[in-house]
């Protein structure tokens, strides 16, 4: 058996194959390689750019003896190319085979893939255009070079060019084993992410969002490293979905303040998604991923005033989201107390000046948050050894969807408040109870093991504002005690999913206390 080592310490770069979609820095990279005496081979438009710059370069067909065909679909899929990439320079039989067939070894490949993600990010792309931007030869070469990193270096990004040239100059045109290993790992990262994006796109196109395939892949692109995770001793980073999303935390632009933390991002996500639920000017205040303030009104400044009045104590250090332009009047209110983040679609110049006086306040601009909508999508979370995947909790409730089960019907104002409270309950941790009045929450009880505890907390939190309010429960009442406590607090109407074995008893309690009760038929558990 032939003895060999898997990875040479250094690989002398004599031939480089260049085939890039992103031409950033290409001309200078090619020039530097050529000046080091490295022979350049290139495909299509990559060749044209290098040749136009009067840098010595060969066409891919000069090696293969075969032209690019099928409108460029086939150009590098050839034994001459892949044998040159895959030949193990440690193995004599491989080198003998190259010599026998007059195949030149390829030592360095610079390649990036067709812009599939960028194509499907466009508003007006066609399905045919998406298909044409699925790269075949590129990932094949990338994988081949990464597999054979013992003998070949693979560059997948213009950001790698400068360090590669520096190493080649310092190391007699050689690339070290350590560098090749890092580049190989990066290459497989690129191809895995690329295939994942295509897979998700096609599954959504052919089967819809409710399709759960046998194997599911999620690809995310790193936005930033974070100082720490939920706690100081945890490491963390923030990643973005490469498939286009509407207004979301990953697309927000920070224009002032300290770097976002792990917990900031979690809280901001809840604030944004809740703000997007409302068509009227609305203000949201989130603390520890739960709403402690939410209100809608005719202007954003009034809505914020009402949201802050819900629970001023809990709002301290909270995250604020507005679904309208932040004006100066609203900015003055926000500046009056300590908060971590303020998010809005835009900011008046005077408002921005006022907010930026708070050095550490994180200010995020997010156009699109003002467009009320509920989005379809997939939610997933990890568990030890696996993941849970589900369709997003996207089931908008209209008044016509509600079933009035009590003798007394809610009046128009009560119904508006019930629908408002129901939306907020969707974003509060279970067991969740939300009290609302005049399209503003006045008390919230969340995350309790018993629903009666959440009800008592919501009433306590509201101070004296619970009298005349309505109540939303994210899941059904198991017992009538919640209704009785609500009645004692002066709550006039309740919205809940229904479906309890004790529904009859609970409805009777509502009728006894002249409380209007509405069933939704859906629930909003948020664990």
Image (cartoon, rainbow, N blue to C red):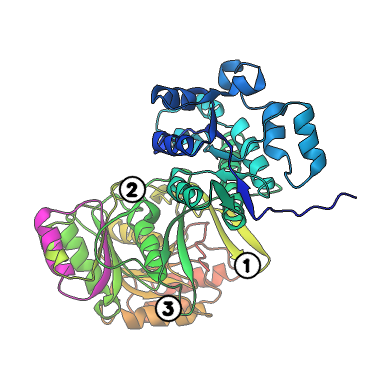
- Magenta residues (range): 330-353
Provide the residue designation for mark 2.
372
Against 503, residue 481 (above or below) is below
Which residue: 64% across, 42% down?
145
Which residue: 72% across, 44% down?
89
Checking the image for residue 155, the label placed there is: none
| Location of residue 79 by image quarter | top right
Q: In the rendered image, is residue 180 in sight? A: yes
- State the CA–CA distance, disc 1 to disc 2: 32 Å
Against 97, residue 169 (above or below) is below
Which element carries disc 1, helix, strand or loop?
strand
| Location of residue 302 by image quarter | bottom left
Q: Does the magenta stretch include residue 333?
A: yes
Which element carries disc 3, helix, strand or loop?
helix
Checking the image for residue 455, the label placed there is: 3
Rendering coords of residue 449 (x, y %): 53, 80
Which residue: 56% across, 17% down?
71
First in sequence: mark 3 vs mark 2:
2
Checking the image for residue 383, the label placed there is: 1
First in sequence: mark 1 vs mark 2:
2
Q: Is residue 147 magenta?
A: no
For the residues bearing labels 3 and 2, Cβ distance under 8 angstroms: no
Residue 108 vs residue 117: left or right?
right
Against 455, residue 400 (above or below) is above
First in sequence: mark 3 vs mark 1:
1
Rendering coords of residue 305 (x, y %): 18, 67
């Amino acid at each position: 058996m032939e003895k060999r080592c898997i990875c040479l310490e250094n690989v002398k770069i004599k031939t480089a194959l260049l085939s890039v979609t992103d031409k950033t820095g290409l001309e200078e990279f090619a020039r530097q390689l050529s000046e080091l005496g490295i022979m350049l081979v290139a495909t299509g438009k990559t060749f044209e750019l290098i040749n136009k710059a009067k840098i010595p370069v060969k066409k891919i067909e000069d090696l293969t003896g075969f032209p690019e065909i099928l409108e460029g679909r086939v150009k590098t899929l050839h034994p001459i190319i892949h044998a040159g990439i895959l030949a193990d320079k440690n193995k004599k039989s491989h080198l003998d085979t190259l010599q026998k067939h007059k195949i030149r070894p390829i030592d360095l490949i610079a390649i990036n893939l067709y812009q599939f993600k960028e194509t499907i990010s466009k508003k007006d792309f066609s399905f045919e255009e998406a298909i044409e931007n699925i790269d075949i030869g590129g990932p094949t070469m990338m994988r081949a070079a990464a597999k054979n990193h013992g003998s070949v270096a693979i560059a997948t990004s213009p950001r790698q060019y400068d360090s590669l040239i520096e190493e080649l100059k310092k190391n007699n045109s050689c690339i070290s084993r350590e560098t090749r290993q890092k580049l190989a790992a990066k290459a497989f990262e690129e191809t895995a992410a690329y295939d994942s994006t295509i897979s998700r796109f096609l599954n959504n196109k052919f089967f819809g969002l409710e399709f759960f395939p046998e194997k599911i892949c999620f690809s995310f692109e790193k936005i930033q490293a974070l100082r720490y995770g939920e706690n100081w001793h945890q490491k963390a980073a923030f990643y973005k979905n490469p498939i286009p999303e509407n207004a979301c935390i990953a697309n927000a632009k920070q224009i002032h303040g300290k770097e976002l933390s792990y917990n900031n991002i979690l809280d901001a996500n809840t604030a944004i998604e809740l703000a997007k639920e409302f068509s009227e000017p609305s203000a949201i205040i989130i603390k520890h991923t739960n709403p402690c303030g939410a209100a809608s009104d005719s202007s954003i400044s009034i809505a914020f005033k009402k949201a802050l009045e819900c629970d001023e104590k809990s709002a301290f250090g909270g995250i604020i989201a507005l679904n309208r332009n932040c004006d100066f009047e609203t900015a003055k209110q926000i500046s009056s107390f300590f908060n971590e983040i303020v998010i809005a679609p835009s900011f008046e110049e005077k408002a921005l000046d006022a907010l930026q006086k708070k050095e550490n306040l994180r200010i995020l601009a997010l156009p699109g948050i003002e467009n009320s909508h509920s989005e379809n999508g997939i939610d997933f979370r990890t568990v030890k050894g696996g993941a849970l995947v589900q369709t997003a909790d996207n089931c908008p409730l209209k008044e016509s969807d509600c079933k009035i089960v009590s003798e007394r019907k809610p009046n128009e104002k009560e119904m508006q408040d019930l629908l408002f409270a129901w939306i907020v309950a969707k974003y509060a941790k279970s067991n969740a109870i939300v009290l609302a009045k005049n399209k503003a929450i006045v008390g919230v009880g969340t995350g309790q093991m018993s629903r009666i505890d959440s009800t008592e907390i919501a009433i306590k939190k509201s101070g004296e504002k619970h009298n005349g309010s309505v109540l939303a429960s994210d899941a059904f009442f198991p017992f009538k005690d919640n209704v009785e406590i609500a009645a004692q607090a002066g709550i006039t109407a309740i919205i809940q999913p229904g479906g309890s074995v004790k529904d009859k008893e609970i409805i009777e309690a509502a009728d006894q206390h002249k409380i209007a009760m509405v069933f939704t038929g859906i629930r909003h558990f948020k664990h």
